[in-house]
Amino acid sequence: MCLDDATVHLRIRTAILAIIDDVKREDGRSDDRNNDRSGSDKREANDERRARSRERQDGYSRDGRSGGSHNEKEEGQDSAAARKKAEDPYWYPGKGKFSHPTKMPSQNPFDPKPRNPKRTQSCRTESPGHRHECIERKHDRREQELEALANGTLRPPPGAGPNWANNREATLAKYAKATNRRHKKHEKNMRKLAEQAAGQAAEP
């Protein structure tokens, strides 16, 4: 029996497609088996992990270490914190656990040994009048420096550049401008306080 070329090609193609389908089917079955095996392995590993953790907890409870060690640790931390507070001369209320000793968020006004006494002298004064006097003295020193700079008697600091005198003169002028503005504000506040005091004294 003689077959034409088209029929032969059709039969060959059908056989090849059948073989491909069989291979795909076998691959799908093997993947399913592998997935089942991996799922069972994961379940076994989880069961083993749970069993080990349960044994560990049972051992802790038998030794009497469950809960007690945590409480002892907390007590030790509290005692250490109290000892540190007693030994620290710079302790102040609200000091944080990890606060840096030289980067304090705010200075304790009742500290007998302040970390920054200059700041305590300049910022925590008795009255705004004392603060103003301090600023006025600083202004007088700057005026003397400006006069010395104009006379040529002021020596430049080490490493000063060629334009140091002009820069210093501009800086002192800027400071003087701010000081004069602050002085006017202070005089205005003092006049206001004097008027208030006179009004209170005039009242019966």
Image: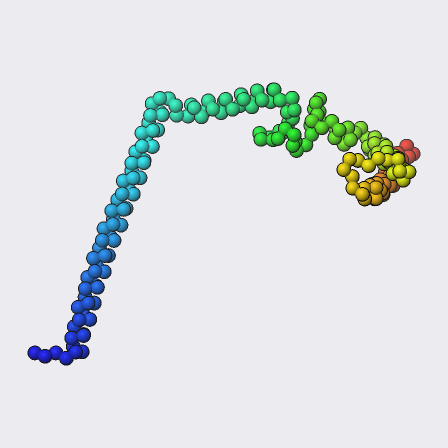
Quadrant where the C terminus is found in the figure: top right
Residue 26 falls in which quadrant of the image? bottom left
x%, y% of residue 35? Answer: 27, 50
In the rendered structure, the answer to whether residue 135 lies left or right of residue 63 reads: right
Residue at 24%, 47% (x, y): give it: 37
Which of 40/68 is in front?
Answer: 40
Q: Nearer the viewer, residue 204 or 193?
A: 193
Give me the residue at 19% from left, 67% from top: 16
Q: In this view of the protein, which residue sits in the foreground, 179 or 96?
A: 179
Residue under the point 47% across and 24% down: 73
Q: Residue lying furthest left in this view?
A: 1
**In the image shown, does 164 or 9 lie closer to the viewer?**
164
In the displayed structure image, the side of residue 17 where residue 158 appears, left or right: right
Residue 174 visible in the picture: no
- Give the answer, above or below, for where 62 lies relative to 103: above
Residue 186 occupies which quadrant of the picture? top right
Give residue 156's position: percent from left, percent from top.
Answer: 82, 36
Quarter of the image for the N terminus: give it: bottom left
Q: How many marks?
A: 0
Residue 28 image point, x, y percent:
24, 57
